[in-house]
Amino acid sequence: MVREQIISWLVENVKPSRVEHILRVEQMAQELALLHKLSREKAGQAGLMHDLAKYFPANKLLDMAFTAALDVDEVMTRNPHLLHADVSAIVARNTFGIEDEEVLRAIANHTLGRPEMSPLCCIVFLADSLEPGRGNTPELEALRQISTENLHQAVWKVCDYSLKFLVSSHHPIHPRTVETRNWFLQKWKSLHSQSL
Ligand SMILES: [Fe+2]
Ligand SMILES: [Fe+2]
């Protein structure tokens, strides 16, 4: 029932192609949850609600972020679209009554990631970048394979993939993407070297 309400809301508030992306993220997050022994229900909820605020205008994103006392830095002020992840979590709480902090954090961290983020956050972050609609290049296929095997390595490499795209397409880079990348790279290295 709640899922149907959310989908009805999405149909009213986001483009049809984005609804399809969202449903693919929901499905991939559920698949990754199963593989990594996480809650399939929470993964699906976060996947379904990760882009609720995708098309909110810049002033609405900024207003809602300030009202919620979010930490809005200079890069976000200049690029309010970066706030759609945090604001989607606010909509999930306020409109759909989601109170599960794990689910809300997975929604809020889906774009920039976050150092030390939870495995549930990792799979929603990965599903957003790697769902089948993103393409089928060898690089994406390799990242999908890694996402089934090792979350630390997958988050690090998806950050690298995003950073390469942002550099080549002349988009601004939020420092948290770099911080996320460094943290997960370091984590993978420390665990990897212990097993050698
Ligand atoms: Fe998003
Ligand atoms: Fe998305």
Image (spheres, rainbow, N blue to C red):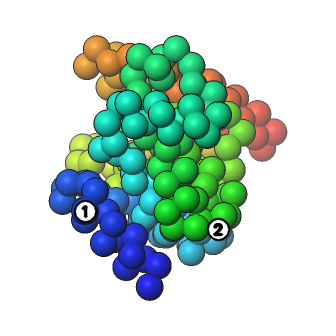
Mark nearer the N terminus (2 vs 1): 1
Quadrant position of the C terminus in the picture: top right
Note whether 93 is above or below 195 in the view shown.
below
Look at label 1 and name its amino acid. Answer: Glu
Q: Secondary structure at mark 2?
A: loop
Q: Residue at x 67, y 58 (%)?
A: 102
Q: Whole-percent x and y of residue 69?
A: 64, 34
Q: Residue at x 58, y 37 (%)?
A: 67
* Left-right relation of 98 to 5: right
Residue 138 found in image quarter: top left
Q: Secondary structure at mark 1?
A: helix
Note whether 104 is above or below 8 in the view shown.
above
For residue 132, say whether it is visible: no
Look at label 2 and name its amino acid. Answer: Leu
Q: Whole-percent x and y of residue 75?
A: 48, 17
Q: Residue at x 59, y 65 (%)?
A: 98
Marks 2 and 1 sit apart, C-alpha to C-alpha, by: 31 Å
Number of numbered callouts drawn: 2
Crowdedness near tag 2: few (<14), some (14–19) or many (≥20) residues, C-alpha within 10 Å = some
Ligand 2 within 8 Å of the CB at mark 2: no
Note whether 61 is above or below 128 in the view shown.
above
Q: Residue at x 39, y 60 (%)?
A: 25
Q: Which residue is mark 2?
A: 38
Q: Which residue is mark 1?
A: 12
Crowdedness near tag 1: few (<14), some (14–19) or many (≥20) residues, C-alpha within 10 Å = few
* Left-right relation of 109 to 13: right
Residue 153 found in image quarter: top right
Q: Whole-percent x and y of residue 182?
A: 63, 25
Q: Whole-percent x and y of residue 180?
A: 60, 30
Quadrant position of the N terminus in the picture: bottom left
Ligand 2 within 8 Å of the CB at mark 1: no
* Left-right relation of 168 to 116: left
